[in-house]
Amino acid sequence: MIELRDVAKRFGEQVVLDGVDFTVADGETVALLGPSGTGKSVLLKHIIGLIKPDRGSVIVDGLDVPRLRRNELRQLRYRIGYVFQNGALFDSMNVFENVRLGISDTDKFDDLAYSRDAVTRCIRLVNLAPETIEKYPAELSGGMRKRVGIARAIVGEPDYLLYDEPTSGLDPVNADIIDDLVKQLDKELGVTSVMVTHDVRGAFRVADRLALLSEGKIVMQGTQQEFLASDSPKVREFLERDFQNATLPEA
Ligand SMILES: Nc1ncnc2c1ncn2[C@@H]1O[C@H](COP(=O)(O)OP(=O)(O)OP(=O)(O)O)[C@@H](O)[C@H]1O
Ligand SMILES: [Mg+2]
């Protein structure tokens, strides 16, 4: 379980999070929505302890993340797969080496046969051809790089998966493929996950619940039906902007 309570974070004069309450139950997939620059990535980084809150608590799996010692934090991070917004692949390493970096157990990492098997299995899970493992990031399309980033996040068999905009910059067909993949992985691996996105349609397809971050607060957290039925102006504005060229599904 992931639980943020009254989390506040500012950078200099800029207040980014201003009392955020956010929870993800075990096995659940929550989509974190919000306009660009509202602090979605900052919120996600609190969960893995990359950023510490000025106020409030961040609890993951019963652990008080900002208060963990270095070693305890490392142990926790081994159990969390993080799909970075920009993919964060190393250009000088091929796909096999990039994905292998996600194997957190040093004995398993050093075992080349194990690594080969695990990387190949994850490459297959993310729907990439087996020969992709010999390629370098520069030889891949944007969508393929995103999938390699996901493979690296799952190869360590995490209990938690945090996706930072896994579909941004992709065309609708490839975005759907990634969304389906997130859903499939959550089902097959039974993980607890947060998917940051500003694509409402994708969020509706994938998530059990949604949360909308706006002006430093979670304006609403609930199911698709609850979002569609909401009369909060911020929720309406966000939904209608995304669905302006399509019909809003019925609540
Ligand atoms: N380490 C940092 N130091 C200073 N300011 C930061 C830092 N990280 C984020 N910010 C600021 O916090 C705000 C929120 O950033 P964040 O990256 O979380 O936005 P976002 O919601 O993820 O946006 P996007 O959808 O564009 O990715 C931005 O104004 C950003 O400049
Ligand atoms: Mg971001």
Image (tube, rainbow, N blue to C red):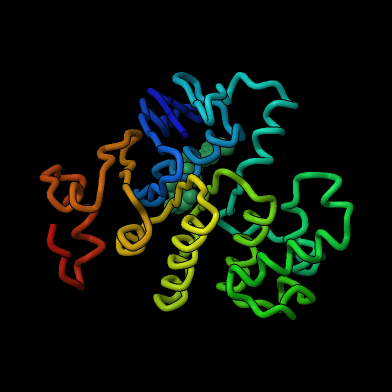
Q: Nearer the viewer, residue 74 or 188?
A: 188
Residue drawn at (63%, 76%), measured in percent from left and top?
Answer: 128
Where residue 149 appears, as percent x and y from the top left, is 63, 61
> Does 15 sit above or below residue 159?
above
Count of labels in the image: 0
Q: Nearer the viewer, residue 233 or 158?
A: 158
Picture quarter with the C terminus:
bottom left
Q: Quadrant of residue 66?
A: top right
- 35 on left or right of 85: left
> Does 155 sit above or below residue 63?
below
- 228 on left or right of 189: left
Residue drawn at (71%, 33%), measured in percent from left and top?
Answer: 74
Where residue 61 appears, as percent x and y from the top left, is 53, 30
Residue drawn at (42%, 78%), measured in percent from left and top?
Answer: 173
Residue drawn at (69%, 40%), measured in percent from left and top?
Answer: 78
- 83 on left or right of 194: right
> Does 18 sit above or below residue 233?
above
